[in-house]
Amino acid sequence: MLKNLLYPNTVAIVGASRAPGKVGHEIVANLINGKFEGKIAPVNPSSDSILGLKCYPDLKSIPNGIDLSIIAVPTPVVKPAIEDSIQAGAKAIIVITAGFKEVGEEGKALEIEIAQICKSKGVNLLGPNCLGLLNTHHKMNASFAKHMPMTGGISVISQSGALCTAILDWAAGRHLGLAKLISMGNKADLCETEFLNAFADDSETKVIVGYLESIVSGDQFIKAAEAAATKKPVVIFKAGTTQAGVKAASSHTGSLAGADIAYGAAFTRSGVIRAETFEAMFDYATAFAMQPLPKGERVAIITNAGGPGIMAADAAEIAGLKVTSLGGGTATALREKLPAAASVANPIDVLGDADPDRYVMAVEAAQADESVDAIIVIMTPQAMTKPAETARAIAKCANHEKPILASFMGGEDVMPGRAELVAHNLPDYTSPERAVAALRAMCTYASWLKRPTRVVTRFPVNRRRAERIIRRHIRTKSFQVGEAYAKEILRAYDFNVPPGEVANNVEVAIEVADRIGYPVAMKIVSPDIIHKSDIGGVKLNLLSAEAVRDAFDLMMLRIRDKMPEARLDGVYIEKMCKRGREVILGMTRDRQFGPMLMFGLGGIFVEVMKDVTFHIAPITADEAIQMLQGTKSYALLKGVRGQASVDIQAIAESLQRISQLVTDFPEIVEMDINPFMVGEVGSESIAADARITLVKKD
């Protein structure tokens, strides 16, 4: 639980200063002002006392040793300060000082050295280049941030110290309590994984919030985040994701999968709620911290103005929530109590002159309605509106079984109401859309908690056959596995592949075509040609030996003209397969999170619309179906306007087989099956084209 870091009894401040404005001074002042109940030990050889506390000339002079050392000295003397701290008994060290890997190679080397010193002694290191940390439940502000927030249930980890100060200022302005706030800085030792593990088991933390710019270990992060999310909500705002994770991708999958896609897939897998903005991060966190999770996605909207009610209904439908029809009994009860002009449909319009009692009637009716899972209450400031009284009345009638989110719209007039809402644990948002987004996040998390146990199917396959092909290609430095051998690998994993063979001259090509039967397809085989169609390396529907001969001669002529340096190993003659719905199945191996599977419809859906979904392997059967459902074009697979549905299960199983293949062979860095032809239920699905890229090894 990182006890010595988060709950120390004796804290030493190395580099404590008598000068206000100096980091070493502000940390001492913050510990005092926060009423830290442990021992505060400033260390400065030039001072006898600081802010009324005895000041020690060095760490060894502190009687009975220390638990936590906070180091705020110039970079060149950080290392000896760490060594002295360890000798004084410190089991945790915070290095506030900057000037490490963020400034160059020399600083990076020093950062690695101090991290290794701490690790060798079993000491936890936070930083360097960080703001410090706060623990409101321990009355400890071990940072140089001026705000000490109220005690609450939200714990924050941040890679940015400046953002920590913004979070503290925001929390103060919203009268929102925090449990702990951690500035991780350069993450030389402790990183997001350790704090996810610690906060998952921390009874004082109800919601975990994170601002991350990078992740140290993708695999460890997913495990820690999933374990934490199983116990409490984890909301993360991930910045710095615009750079593509794959620079020289040779496959469709690789070209579509950037760093942002990888993080999104990792968050989905681990149950993390992703906030797209700083504002959304705390919108979601406050909802999770203040309200119970919804049991479903049916929402009732209560408003004193028609326009904002419509705004909320539109936002809810776009977000995939259900603006539910109220039960007959609910509508009848409301009609009896509300003015005749009021609307008792959903949204429930209590009219502009609504007093607190009218809001209470509507809230109580919605809470009692079995067709309602969550409630959004909207207020606009009108002449007769009583925001503070209304907020208190809503809070008093809330039964805490269904979440209630409020949107008191406006400025100065509704401020008293907003303060009352926060004071009574009712999250308030400046617009209905923000309230809806927070509710959507709650529903997503509630649904994730109900997910079935993850069971990854292992299919019986011929792994040795695939291994021989892969090993041979790596041994001969043929890292691009062409269609012919890629399909051999797929056959080993029980994919249905049309019969075909490689022919190194025209006579063999004709012999193969005669044997497998017409019509056939002819495709160039070359380790130097990835996109065959682009240079005339594909001919389809060849109906005779003469057509095969003509196609072979023309293909070789054109390719030698366009790519004279390309190595040509012949052509691949393959039986033409039946047409079906074209989809693409693929994988690219992310540097952080490992193999990411991709699914999308073929043609313009992948080329132009980029309508694809990704998931981290290995995947379960349910996750494979979710990948299909995650595309906008899923309805086309299910069948529209009289068209029959394609075999959804066949696609899902094929995704699972790819998942098994790329998990078995980490040497595979990219692959596409494009197109994968899928027909109606009961028909055979066919891998019509495929290619695989292997990792380059010296």
Image (spheres, grey):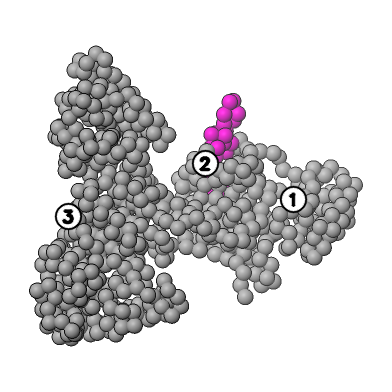
What amino acid is found at the position of numbered circle 3 in the picture? Thr
315 to 616, vertically: above or below: above
Magenta highlight on residue 645:
yes
Mark 2, mark 3: which one is toward the viewer? 3
Image quadrant of residue 580? top right
Residue designated by label 1:
533
Image quadrant of residue 125? bottom left
Bin the neighbour count of mark 1 within 10 Å (Cα to Cα): few under 14, some 14-19, many 20 and up.
few
Q: Where are the magenta residues, as a range?
A: 633-655
Q: Position of residue 587 (x, y in %)?
A: 56, 55
Marks 2/3: CA–CA distance: 43 Å
Q: Which mark is residue 631?
A: 2
Bin the neighbour count of mark 2 within 10 Å (Cα to Cα): few under 14, some 14-19, many 20 and up.
some
Marks 2/1: CA–CA distance: 27 Å
* Picture quarter with the C terminus: bottom right
Image quadrant of residue 130? bottom left
Q: Which mark is residue 151?
A: 3
CB-based contact (under 8 Å), mark 2 and mark 3: no
Magenta highlight on residue 356:
no
Closer to the camera in the image, 164 or 253: 164
Closer to the camera in the image, 1 or 125: 125
Q: Helix, strand or loop at disc 1?
A: helix
